[in-house]
Image (spheres, grey):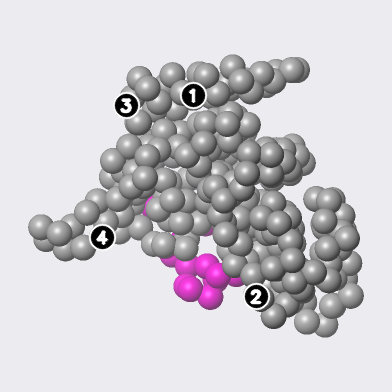
Amino acid sequence: MEHLLYGKEIVKSYGEGREEHIVLDSVSLEIEKGEFVSVMGPSGSGKSTLLYTLSGMDPAYSGSVVFDGCRLSGLKEDALSDLRRNRMGFVFQQPAFLKNLNLLDNIILPAMRDNRRNVRAVTLKAKNLMKKVGIEELEERDITQVSGGQLQRAGICRALMSEPDIIFGDEPTGALNSKSAQEIMALLKEINAEGTAVLVVTHDAKVAAKTRRVLFMQDGKIVSELKFENEKTENYDKREDIIMKRMQQIGI
């Protein structure tokens, strides 16, 4: 497989002198094209900071991040913003939607920056994505009139508008009930099966069990890793047990 994303000796810290806190401590990793990876660890382990650093949203203090052959630190802010908007998608625990726009308009809004002359095509694409994730009947709803699971599906639609190479998910199921969480993970798995790489940060072993590779973080370092092989019938309960045992072994 080809590398899509590569981080080498990434260091990230906050504060200075005695108050300096190292959040990422010489972290190195690779994400392959089309891979489905999760990052687990306790609060403060650096997992969300790693996601933001790999996506170029938060620059590293030292080390390097390379996306599809392009070193992020060598890009000007405009070029980096274009890269994120066109080749990366983001799904957060709480989707940042505007209350004065309906669900459909919230989905198409970021895509309109580069497609102001092609509103019809952008709108049709958004509607097709809403149909794909099962919320086509909610186009005109305000964001206060839908459930958390429906709102997260809309967030996934927005992330897919640019047909990204990778989707970054920061606790994408963290605010959902168990049923909605499983539905969102099934959706991300389907998107991954179509060729889009997915990297999710999670504290939930059930979520991590849906991914192919699990990275475990502690005190700013990747301390362990699990990789699951393709199986005709995937036993997610068994995977969850394996993940929980590994967490106990490394003390997280």
Q: Quadrant of residue 104?
A: bottom right
Upstream in the sequence, badge 1 or badge 4? 4
Q: Residue at x 48, y 73 (%)?
A: 77
Q: Residue 243: which numbered mark, if any? A: 1
Residue where numbered disc 4 is placed: 14
**Marks 2 and 4, how far apart in space?**
31 Å
Q: Is residue 107 above or below residue 203?
A: below
Marks counted in the figure total 4
| Secondary structure beneath label 1 | helix
Residue where numbered disc 3 is placed: 251
Upstream in the sequence, badge 3 or badge 2? 2
- Disc 4: CA contacts within 10 A as few (<14), some (14-19) or many (>=20): few
Q: Amino acid at mark 2?
A: Leu
Q: Are marks 3 and 2 in contact (CB under 8 Å)?
A: no
Q: Amino acid at mark 1?
A: Ile
Q: Residue at x 31, y 54 (%)?
A: 12
Q: Nearer the viewer, mark 4 or mark 3?
A: 3
Residue where numbered disc 2 is placed: 98
Please state, as top left, top right, bottom left or bottom right, where the C terminus lies in the image.
Answer: top left
Upstream in the sequence, badge 2 or badge 4? 4
Q: Is residue 88 above or below residue 78?
A: above
In the image: residue 71, left or right of residue 169: left
Is 172 inside the magenta-drawn segment? no
Q: Residue at x 41, y 46 (%)?
A: 47
Q: Quadrant of residue 232?
A: top right
